[in-house]
Image (cartoon, helix red, strand yellow):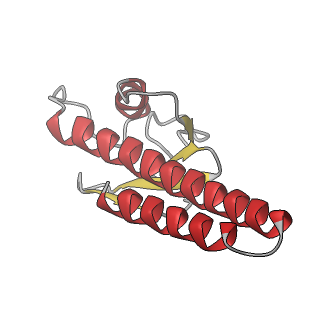
Amino acid sequence: MQRLGGLLVACLLLFGIAACGDSKDDAQDAVDSAREQAENAAGAAGARAAAEAMRGVLQAKHLEANQTVRDVVVLQAAADDVPGSPTVTGIEDQDGDGKDDDGKVQFAVGDQVACVSVQDNGEVSVSSDSC
């Protein structure tokens, strides 16, 4: 949130500087650029927040004796518990063993993404990159 606040202040400064220029087009370009930067920052925060929410759900999950955090049903249930409406991809079981093939789940909000990586040992990590 602090990063988003700083970005908004920067956007306001850009708008103020551009508004002092000679051209209305320059001012509009600055406003459009600032708006796009703010939207990207909000999307990045949303994608990362969704991924962090899934990590929290997985770490708090009480698993059955025969389940692991790599199980497709566990990952899907955790993804379903994430608030908001992020686009979730990557939960796949092509070999039919009931476990996610690569342990990576991607969250997208707008054009921003974050990745949850689940290891066989149960370790869960989050990155602000695509899977």
**What residue is at 47 percent from the left and 47 percent from the top?**
47
Pick whichever, 46 or 4, lies toward us: 4
**What residue is at 23 percent from the left and 31 percent from the top?**
66
Residue 80 placed where, x, y %? 42, 24
Residue 19 placed where, x, y %? 67, 66
Pick whichever, 9 or 86, lies toward us: 9
Q: Is residue 32 left or right of residue 68?
A: right
**What residue is at 54 percent from the left and 63 percent from the top?**
11
Q: Can you say which quadrant of the picture contains the N terminus?
A: bottom left
Q: Tell me where residue 37 sits by quadrant.
A: bottom right
- Answer yes or no: is residue 105 visible: no
Residue 89 placed where, x, y %? 58, 40
Q: Can you say which quadrant of the picture contains the C terminus?
A: bottom right
Q: Is residue 29 above or below residue 56?
A: below
- Answer yes or no: is residue 11 visible: yes
Residue 7 placed where, x, y %? 45, 64
Number of marks drawn: 0
Pick whichever, 108 or 77, lies toward us: 108
Q: Is residue 75 above or below residue 4?
A: above
**What residue is at 29 percent from the left and 45 percent from the top?**
55
